[in-house]
Amino acid sequence: MFLFIDPTKEKIELEIWDRKGLQCKAKYPADQNLSAQFLTWIDEFLSVNTASKEDLKGLVVIRGPGSFTTLRVVVSTLNALAYALDIPIIGVDKSKGFSRGIVEKLLGAGNFKTPVAPYYKEPPKVTKPRRGVVKF
């Protein structure tokens, strides 16, 4: 079974796919608590569907474009999870979507051990540091 994650929408979509196709799906809010809750949601989603992380044969994630913070949290967490479970991970551009063909590619092909890099539609808007030292 493969876990598919789409973090590019207002709600993060989790889906379980196998050789027969889509088996189940759920949506979770992409809010301020994402980094603290994301792995818990994965465990909960798998548990409700009588599965565990150890049952996963691979991860598929839409790598963007989307919210900078959501993509960064989700993609980095999934890269770490794939590494910890020693399973393949593949990143898919949003424009290409997800299909049975991607599952088949994971099932029959390479190891896909290279971490996925998020795709941002524009550079992050990070403020420049202030000049000088802040005194208290």
Image: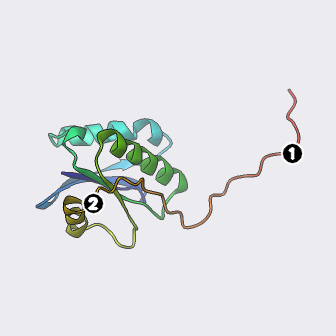
- The spot of residue 123 in percent (x, y) is 62, 63
**Label 2's element?**
loop
From the image, tell me which residue sits under label 1. Answer: 131
**Amino acid carrying mark 1 in the image:** Arg
Total numbered badges shown on the rendered structure: 2
Q: Is residue 78 above or below residue 93?
A: above
- Above or below, comparing residue 8 to residue 95 in the picture: above
> Residue shown at 54%/55% (left/top)?
68
At label 2, which amino acid type do we have? Answer: Gly
Which numbered disc flags the more N-terminal residue, 2 or 1? 2
In depth, the one of 61 and 114 nearer the eye is 114
Q: Position of residue 8 (x, y in %)?
A: 43, 60
Q: Is residue 86 left or right of residue 118?
A: left
For the residue pair 41 and 76, the one nearer the viewer reads as: 76
Residue 7 visible: yes
Q: Residues within 10 Å of mark 1 (few under 14, many from 20)?
A: few
Q: Is residue 30 visible?
A: no
Disc marking residue 110: 2
Classify 114 as above or below 85: below
From this viewpoint, which residue is outermost toward the front? Answer: 110
At 42% from the left and 56% from the top, the residue drawn is: 116
Q: Residue at x 34, y 36 (%)?
A: 40
Numbered label attached to residue 58 = none
In which quadrant of the rendered image does the C terminus lie? top right
Query: Picture coordinates of residue 39 (x, y %)?
Result: 36, 38
Residue lying at 78% horizontally and 47% vertically, measured from the top left: 129
Q: From what the image shows, is residue 55 above or below residue 119?
A: above
Looking at this view, is 28 or 39 the one in front? Answer: 39
Mark 2 residue crowding within 10 angstroms, few (<14) / some (14–19) / many (20+): few
